[in-house]
Amino acid sequence: MTLADMAQLLSADPDYRVIRRLQPSTHFDRAAVGPVKRVAVLDTETTGLSSATDVIIELALVVMDIDTLTGQPVGEVLVFDGFQDPGRPIPKEVQQLTGISDAMVKGQALDEAAISSIMDGVQWVVAHNAGFDRPFVEQRLSYFADLPWACSFADIPWKQHGIGSAKLEALAAHYGWFYDAHRADMDCHALAAVLGQPVGDTGQLGWQLLLSALDAPQYTLQATGAPFDAKDALKARGYRWDGVQRVWHTRVASEQGLRDECAWLGDHVYANPRAQVAVAEVNALARYSARTPQFVSHAVRAT
């Protein structure tokens, strides 16, 4: 009996789950039944967490066409993966996490012509933590600012659909794969594979949910003037603290969500029924970028 036979036998038993090594897809042998939308799945490895002080050391792109009716990828898959010498030693914790050493990047530079070529015709970009990757990439290659972005971590409510963790390794394991994580190229292949699977009981593939999120209105809400003693409630609800602007903020994915969030703030944070928060509508061209959106005042309670 071969290992494949044994794996198939175990998979047939409800008391066992078999996790297989992910094999990257280079071609999807199916025809589109509707219009296609070319997407670049992107991932970076960097010297640290701040796009203001740190730099990219690896950039990977996996480009494919998505059938907008079925959510299925079709045709050829294009791949770019390249290193960039940061001009300074890579921190040891980054080397341990990514496996990228100073020797691997020494003298290396991203091939901008190759990146421009593979990005030709791309209509949108997906990253699993777009709020991290987008500022780094736009700083290095400014034309990425002209494309709409989606975030597979934030734009799909994985936990609401019965999937326990939104981390990419956990999502891959949920669908039966393991892979060498924290290298940009394999992270892109893993994300593309995950998005080609149905999400919970939605009846839709991950790609379809992202395409819907791409066109849906989204809002950034700042809980301006929130009292100090509300910080625990705000944090528990998912608000994040902006240490520069000194304000709690969150992202809301729909107009109804914005109304619900304002109602929650009125009930749990603000004692003044005339309190105002700051709200900015952010479309996919600006979403997850480091650019400051245009905020306007918004009443917590409708009058």
Image: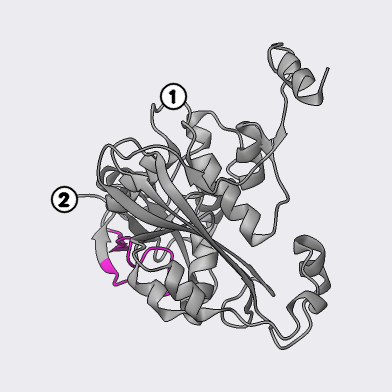
Residue 261 seen in the figure: no
Left or right, 64 with reference to 85: left
Q: Which residue is mark 1?
A: 201
Q: Nearer the viewer, residue 236 or 22?
A: 22
Is 174 in the magenta? Answer: no
Question: Which residues, given as a range, are shown in magenta?
Answer: 275-296
- Sort mark 2 into few (<14), some (14-19) or many (20+) by Cα contacts within 10 Å: few
Q: Looking at numbered disc 1 in the image, what kind of residue is underneath it?
A: Asp
Left or right, 5 with reference to 235: right
Q: Nearer the viewer, residue 43 or 83?
A: 83
Q: Residue 215 in the image: x percent, y percent?
A: 27, 51
Q: Kindly identify the residue that appears in the image at 25 percent across and 50 percent down.
A: 301
Left or right, 257 with reference to 225: left
Q: Looking at numbered disc 2 in the image, what kind of residue is underneath it?
A: Thr
Picture layout, residue 10 above or below residue 41: above
Which circle marks residue 303 in the picture? 2
